[in-house]
Image (cartoon, rainbow, N blue to C red):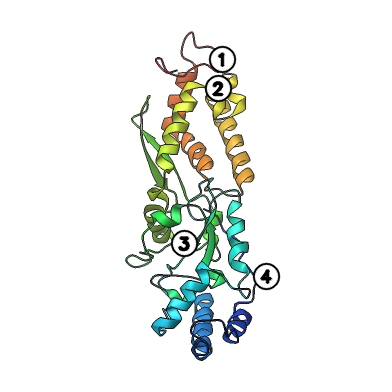
């Protein structure tokens, strides 16, 4: 998850005007008559800052809806932004879920429900396969909604971390949101976490990362190949690695940072430091017995 700069290099209104003159469109010349309504939809989308609670759908004739979806599937020369944004999905982490996967585009407002935005640059977000795992539900009750990487500045903050409970070889692992319930975007963050992030394989990633730390601590941070001198030294090492991962992936909500930030929980940190001090343990050796 991350805040992104929108694709300001592309002029959506100019593209619509060009499409209106394209005689190869199946619905030409009817498409031209709908251009003002489509432009109006785009304008109110931006005015609403992509807030799914506030963006209004636009009623269009069925042939126009079908044409817009077809243009996304097979972009014409007027729509070079679609492939360009898709290429940006090779970014450091997925702006929608924080994974390290890439290769696809996400219609923030699903094109099946909002066909008017099927080719709209501000509705196309580079993403991973999380876009196929989330449902078409983009809003819940009150302020619950999906977050928008082009508009929601809160995505620059650390929004959730791993929670480790029943510590040991196989702890119970969940995600813990960080924003206080009174925060104006707390409901949106929790909704996004539930409906996008938790539908991915992030919990499996966190379980694997935990196992790796128990097997060889330096897999969490290279400095941990040497037993930390104190609990504070352990916390400092993990914090340094956390900031390194934030910078590496350009996000405080990439999965690696979610894992490391969870290790800094007081109870988890206490458990880890006690494991480091286990009698007879070798440097960078296992933190528990019976793991290979």
The location of residue 58, given as percent across then percent down, is 42, 82
Residue at 39%, 15% in the rendered image: 290
How many numbered dots are placed on residues in this image?
Answer: 4
Residue named by callout 3: 147
**Label 2, label 4: how far apart the Cα atoms are:** 51 Å
Residue named by callout 4: 9
**Label 1, label 4: how far apart the Cα atoms are:** 52 Å
Q: Do we see residue 181 in this rendering?
A: no
Q: Mark 2 or mark 4, which has the lower sequence index?
A: 4
Residue named by callout 1: 283
Q: Residues within 10 Å of mark 3 (few under 14, many from 20)?
A: many
Q: Residues within 10 Å of mark 2 (few under 14, many from 20)?
A: few
The location of residue 139, given as percent across then percent down, is 37, 66
Q: Are marks 1 and 4 in contact (CB under 8 Å)?
A: no
Q: Mark 4 or mark 3, which has the lower sequence index?
A: 4
The location of residue 200, given as percent across then percent down, is 41, 47
Q: Are marks 3 and 1 in contact (CB under 8 Å)?
A: no
Relative to 130, residue 51 above or below: below
- Is 270 on the left-hand or right-hand side of 121? left
Relative to 75, residue 31 above or below: below
Which label lies toward us, 2 or 3?
A: 3
Q: Mark 3 or mark 1, which has the lower sequence index?
A: 3
Residue at 54%, 83% in the rendered image: 39
Relative to 29, residue 91 above or below: above
Residue at 61%, 57% in the rendered image: 87
Q: Residues within 10 Å of mark 1 (few under 14, many from 20)?
A: some
In what element is the residue under mark 2?
loop
Q: Nearer the viewer, residue 286 or 58?
A: 58
Residue named by callout 2: 230
**Label 4, label 3: how far apart the Cα atoms are:** 22 Å
Q: Mark 2 or mark 3, which has the lower sequence index?
A: 3
């Amino acid at each position: 998850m991350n805040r992104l700069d929108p694709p300001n290099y592309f002029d959506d209104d100019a593209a619509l005007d060009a499409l209106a003159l394209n005689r190869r469109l199946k619905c030409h010349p009817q498409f031209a008559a709908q251009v003002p309504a489509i432009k109006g939809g785009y304008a109110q989308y931006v005015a609403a800052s992509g807030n799914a609670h506030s963006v209004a759908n636009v009623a269009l004739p069925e042939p126009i809806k079908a044409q817009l979806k077809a243009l996304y599937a097979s972009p014409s020369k007027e729509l070079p932004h679609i492939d360009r944004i898709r290429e940006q999905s090779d970014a450091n982490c997925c702006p929608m879920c924080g994974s390290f996967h890439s290769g696809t585009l996400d219609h923030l407002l699903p094109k099946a429900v909002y066909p008017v935005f099927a080719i709209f640059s501000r509705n196309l977000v580079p993403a991973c396969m999380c876009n196929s795992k989330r449902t078409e539900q983009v809003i819940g009750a009150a302020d619950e909604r999906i977050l928008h990487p082009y508009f929601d500045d809160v995505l620059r903050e650390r929004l959730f971390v791993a929670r480790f409970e029943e510590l040991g070889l196989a702890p119970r692992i969940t995600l813990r949101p960080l924003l206080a319930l009174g925060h104006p975007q707390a409901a949106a963050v929790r909704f996004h976490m539930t409906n996008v992030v938790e539908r991915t394989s992030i919990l499996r990633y966190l379980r694997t990362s935990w196992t790796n730390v128990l097997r060889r601590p330096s897999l969490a941070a290279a400095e941990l190949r040497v037993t930390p001198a104190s609990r504070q030294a352990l916390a400092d090492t993990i914090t340094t690695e956390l900031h390194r991962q934030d910078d590496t992936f350009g996000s405080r909500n990439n999965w690696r940072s979610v894992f490391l930030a969870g290790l800094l929980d007081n109870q988890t940190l206490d458990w880890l430091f006690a494991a480091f001090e286990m009698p007879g343990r070798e440097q960078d050796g296992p933190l528990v017995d019976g793991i290979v």
